[in-house]
Image (spheres, helix red, strand yellow):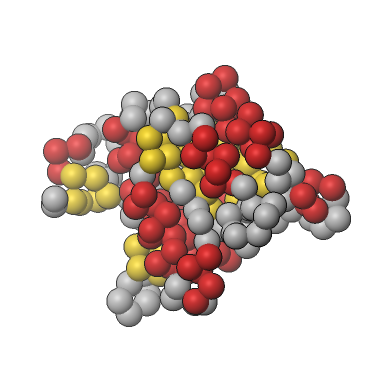
Amino acid sequence: MTSTSTPAPDTDRPLETLRIGLVSISDRAHAGVYEDKGLPALVDWLGRAVRNPIDWQRRLIPDEQPLIEQTLRELADETHCDLVLTTGGTGPAPRDVTPEATLAVADRQIPGFGEQMRQIGLRFVPTALLSRQVGVVRGRALILNLPGQPRAIAETLEGLPQASPPAPGIFAAVPYCIDLIGGPWIETDPAVCQAFRPKSALRAR
């Protein structure tokens, strides 16, 4: 399938607001043992990458599967987020239950997101194989599990364009995925992340 970049924005037509749910999942950060760094890292990267106005919905919760499921359902079904990103809780430890909670609320799974996240991580450490991130759709919300560390969050979303060979980041595929599930048109800043869509999906604003 031939893909190309999103056309240059037409400033006469404003972009729709993108509602993004951010969920940091950590027992110790929730208890105040240390400062949560996942939510600020997500806001920083997305704020630079996305040109749409953003309505942020932030949650900091412990590693409890029923609570994670409840939070994801609330963000998708009641708050009507277009995109929900979680950070933390994706390893093999007994308290790491984010993937199980995400799959429990899913209508459909999109395996490519998790596969590419692990491919990016493997450029740095062999233990990236232990990461169990998943990507799913619930209704009109795309839900993605991300790593817990700020640098890994940025690398996963943005990719490694200077690497040899380059490793595409997962966010390049997010705007078109949200198109397909009925969400708003998303434009990105190509200096941070170049969104890709098939030629047949492009539109002038």
Identify the residue at image location x=34%, y=30%: 181
Residue at the extreme top = 78
Identify the image quadrant of the C terminus.
Answer: top left
Identify the residue at image location x=58%, y=55%: 90
Q: Using the rendered image of the protein, determine whether residue 54 is visible from the camera's viewpoint.
A: no
Q: Nearer the viewer, residue 26 or 91?
A: 91
Residue 152 position by quadrant: bottom right
Residue at the extreme front = 94
- The mark tally for this picture is 0
Identify the residue at image location x=13%, y=50%: 1
Q: Could you tell me residue 151's position as x and y percent?
A: 58, 66
From the viewer's perspective, tell me whether residue 3 is left or right of residue 177: left
Q: Using the rendered image of the protein, determine whether residue 173 is visible from the camera's viewpoint.
A: yes
Identify the residue at image location x=82%, y=57%: 34
From the viewer's perspective, tell me whether residue 15 is left or right of residue 148: left
Q: Could you tell me residue 144's position as x and y percent?
A: 48, 45
From the viewer's perspective, tell me whether residue 169 is left or right of residue 91: left
Rendered view: 100 above or below 123: above
Residue at the extreme bottom = 164
Rendered view: 10 above or below 98: above
Q: Nearer the viewer, residue 39 or 145?
A: 145
Q: Could you tell me residue 173's position as x and y percent?
A: 33, 48
Q: Could you tell me residue 20's position as x and y percent?
A: 53, 36
Q: Nearer the viewer, residue 45 or 34?
A: 34
